[in-house]
Amino acid sequence: MGSSADGLVKVSRSRAVYKQITGRKYAYLLVSAVALVVAVIADVVTGPSGLSVRQAVATIISPGSADTTTRAIVWLIRLPVAVTALTVGASLGMAGAEMQTILGNPLASPYTLGIASAAGFGAALAIVLGVGVMPVAGQFLIPLNAFVFALLCSFVVYLVARLKQATTETLILAGVALHFLFSSLIALLKYLATSERLHAVVFWLFGDLNKARWPDIAVIGSFLLVVYPILARDAWKLTALRLGDEKAESLGVDVERLRLKVLLLISALTATAICFVGTIGFIGLAAPHIARMLVGEDQRFYVPLSTIGGALLLSIASIASKSIVHGVVFPVGVITSFIGIPFFVSLVLRKRKRFW
């Protein structure tokens, strides 16, 4: 009887500790979601027009109640940028989280496999060939070309992974090789381009949230909503994958199939996000690390927090891009690089407390 009672007490304590830990993780998700809402509103308000928070919120909720100028500023200029930051940041955060999971590498991100470089080459090729000087054609063909080349890069990595049984080392090495290949091709296009088209290529590669419009945002958001439930359904398998391939396989997980499936999903997700806005770095690296520090490896919390964290980081970068110099909007890709470089260096130099 005594041992049975002790066992019940231990089980009760374990449940209490589990509920406490789980409650803390839910709290992190809630606080992050609230911070994201505040950041999106701040992104809409920030700028030279002098909108107040009340005006911005009222115009978003009830556009008909605002005057024509305020409605145009909010719905045609500010809100598309804010929602683009939200959807693109969420896509990159989610893709980075799963990239680090399937590769087992703390420094992995969607750019590890050369996807961003491939998208940049596709856009640069379209611009140099003259598509960029035709506004109507360029509006569709430049992002389409970026998307196609990003998926082509993913397909090449997929083929290599299939030939070499999808080891993480093979995926990383293939991605690095493709990154340098497409970076070299971009440099060649810059050398061959006219001054006007060279300027357009460089500006696209910076990453700019002002490029996306409501139809583009709808595409990015729709793809995000499609991919997330698929990944959420495999949350247990992906959490098991963090124990190592052998242990995951002993639990009934088809590791090779899972890794390739997730690779294709996050590659398409990344391609969809960056083909409209250009290359934006470090979001897919920083957001998953912050999420891991807060909630650990449990995919039920890790992926949602990485997704919210990516959206929050890019929203903050969007606000910063409009606040550094009054009346000047810097490309958000430049801002994320300034944010990401010290973060990356801190990961490399960190010895005592490891994120991984």
Image (tube, grey):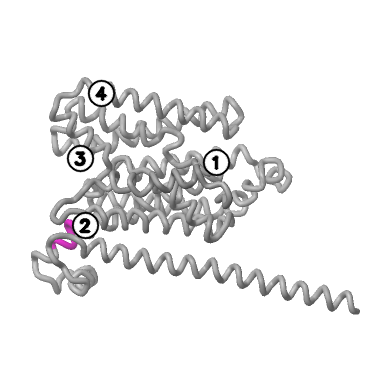
**301 in relation to 182, above or below:** below
> Is 74 inside the magenta-drawn segment?
yes
Looking at the rendered structure, the kind of residue marked 3 is Gln
157 or 317: nearer the viewer = 317
Measured Cα–Cα span from mark 2 to mark 1: 35 Å
Q: Residue at the spot x=20%, y=25% of the render? A: 129
Looking at the rendered structure, the kind of residue marked 1 is Asn
Rendered-image quadrant of the N terminus = bottom right
Q: Of the residues under marks 4 and 2, which one precedes in the sequence?
A: 4
Residue 137 percent across, percent down from the top left: 18, 35
Give the residue number, with chain letter if any, for mark 3: 139
Looking at the rendered structure, the kind of residue marked 2 is Ser
> How many residues crowd mark 4 within 10 Å: few (<14), some (14–19), many (20+)?
many
Residue 72 percent across, percent down from the top left: 13, 61
Q: Say what secondary structure mark 4 lies in.
A: helix
**Main secondary-structure element of the magenta-colored stretch:** helix
Give the residue number, with chain letter if any, for mark 2: 323
